[in-house]
Image: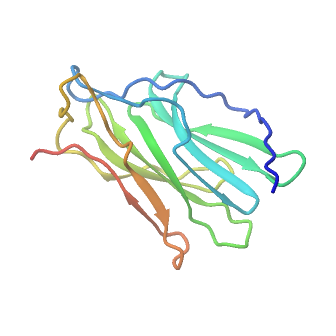
Amino acid sequence: NTVTTRALVSNQRYFFPPDGRQTIATQSLATNDCRNLGAFFENNTIQYVHNTANPANGKVTVYHGVINNVSSANPVVTGNLLPNDTMDFAYPNISYAGVKFTQDNRSIITFDHSSTKVFPGVSAIHSDGQGNYSSILRIQNGTQYVNLLTANLERWGDYSGSQRRYNRPGEVWMSGYYGYNF
């Protein structure tokens, strides 16, 4: 077997992400870095997601990359940043939500959210794979900020995930993270 690799350059740059904000200024949420956190291959297309800084506002957000025509001599990669004017978005995952064996490239992207006014929670967005997105659905808002570690930088969401339910096109199951009192 032969493995062939090739470097592709996206139309959208990505950046090292800042820490996520919380309602308490002394506690931040770690985003770690820009490594890919989720991906799938369907219809000769790879879709992937990772953390990035949004250059328009300096907040952490989700980078959604799409590599089209993977098996061709000239695959093309495009990227989009999820818009986030007031919230921080991080730790995304992505699952195929289209109809297999068609050119349906829909996906569901799940991710954590937080801000100076909203406790850490989990959200989702629908993508058509062509750069169009639904409104963001907040699945679960937190009821408290996160303060478990002795440092001022808390972990969040690096243990979330999503998976398509194969016998039900368009249905995705996910696990997420939110702050709560216990």
Q: Foreground: 160 or 14?
A: 160
Residue appearing at x 31%, y 32% in the figure? 115
Q: Foreground: 145 or 158?
A: 158
Residue appearing at x 49%, y 72% in the figure? 165
Q: Is residue 152 above or below residue 90?
A: above
Residue 72 in the image: state x and y as whole percent. 87, 52
Q: Is residue 36 above or below residue 168?
A: above
Give the left or right position of residue 160, taking residue 104 as reference.
left
Residue 42 in the image: state x and y as whole percent. 68, 62
Residue 102 in the image: state x and y as whole percent. 73, 71
Please tell me in which quadrant of the rendered image residue 119 appears: top left
Q: Foreground: 134 or 35?
A: 35
Here the colouring is rainbow
Residue appearing at x 51%, y 77% in the figure? 168
Residue 103 in the image: state x and y as whole percent. 74, 66
Is residue 97 something that shows in the picture?
yes
